[in-house]
């Protein structure tokens, strides 16, 4: 069983994230979507709410499960015996930061590879930050996020 980890805050999960999850399932037998909290990052939704949205969004995807984690990704990768970390690259501007993280994870979790995946062109501009901004300003977001996320955002912003 070749296991990979796709980690992020997923605040909230978007169709761009789901596109990468689907792509990763074509490469690995098992994928753990690791929902994390970063102490330096303020999120709109709690970790448990984000986990529930991810879980509902991935229902029906074979070999995919979601878990909460905190701390170093390299430690989580080692505990789960994953062989790879999935990272998404939407634009060249993402690469420098992602490359630094990949090199650090290689040092902290030797034998674990970072696999960079690009989303479908129709999702390259999507980010959780943009989705929240559109939702906050009462814009239509249903084509960019799973139904559960659209519902939660509308409730959060009183739409």
Image (tube, rainbow, N blue to C red):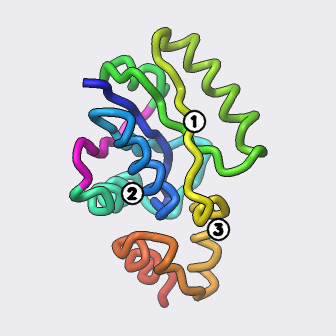
Range shown magenta: 61-70
- Up/down of 85 relative to 18, above or below: above
Secondary structure under badge 1?
strand
Residue 147 percent location from the top left of the image: 36, 75
Q: Which residue is mark 1?
A: 116
Q: Identify the residue at image location x=27%, y=44%.
A: 65
In the rendered image, residue 32, in percent from the top left (x then y), is placed at 33, 38
Q: Which residue is mark 2?
A: 50
Position of the N terminus by quadrant: top left
Relative to residue 89, is residue 29 drawn left or right?
Answer: left
Dot 1 alpha-carbon crowd within 10 angstroms: few under 14, some 14 to 19, many 20 or more: some
- Location of mark 3 (residue): 130
Looking at the image, is mark 1 or mark 2 nearer the viewer?
1
Tag count in the figure? 3
N-term-proximal mark, 3 vs 1: 1
Rendered residue at 63%/84% (across/down) = 137
Classify residue 52 by image quadrant: bottom left
Label 3 sits on a secondary structure element that is helix
* Residue count near mark 2 (Cα–Cα under 10 Å), binned few <14, some 14–19, many ≥20: many
Q: Is residue 140 above or below residue 124?
A: below
């Amino acid at each position: 069983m070749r296991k990979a980890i796709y980690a992020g805050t997923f605040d909230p999960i978007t169709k761009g994230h789901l596109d990468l999850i689907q792509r990763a399932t074509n490469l690995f037998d098992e994928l753990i979507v690791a929902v994390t909290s970063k102490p330096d990052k303020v999120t709109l939704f709690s970790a448990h709410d984000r986990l529930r949205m991810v879980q509902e969004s991935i229902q029906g995807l074979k070999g995919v499960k979601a878990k909460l984690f905190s701390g170093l990704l390299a430690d989580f990768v080692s505990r789960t015996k994953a062989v790879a970390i999935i990272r998404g690259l939407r634009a060249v501007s993402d690469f420098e930061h992602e490359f630094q993280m990949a090199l650090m994870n290689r040092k902290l979790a030797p034998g674990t590879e970072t696999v960079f995946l690009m989303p479908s062109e129709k999702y390259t501009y999507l980010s959780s930050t943009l989705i929240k901004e559109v939702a906050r300003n009462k814009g239509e977001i249903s084509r960019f996020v799973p139904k559960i996320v659209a519902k939660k955002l509308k409730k959060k912003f009183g739409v």
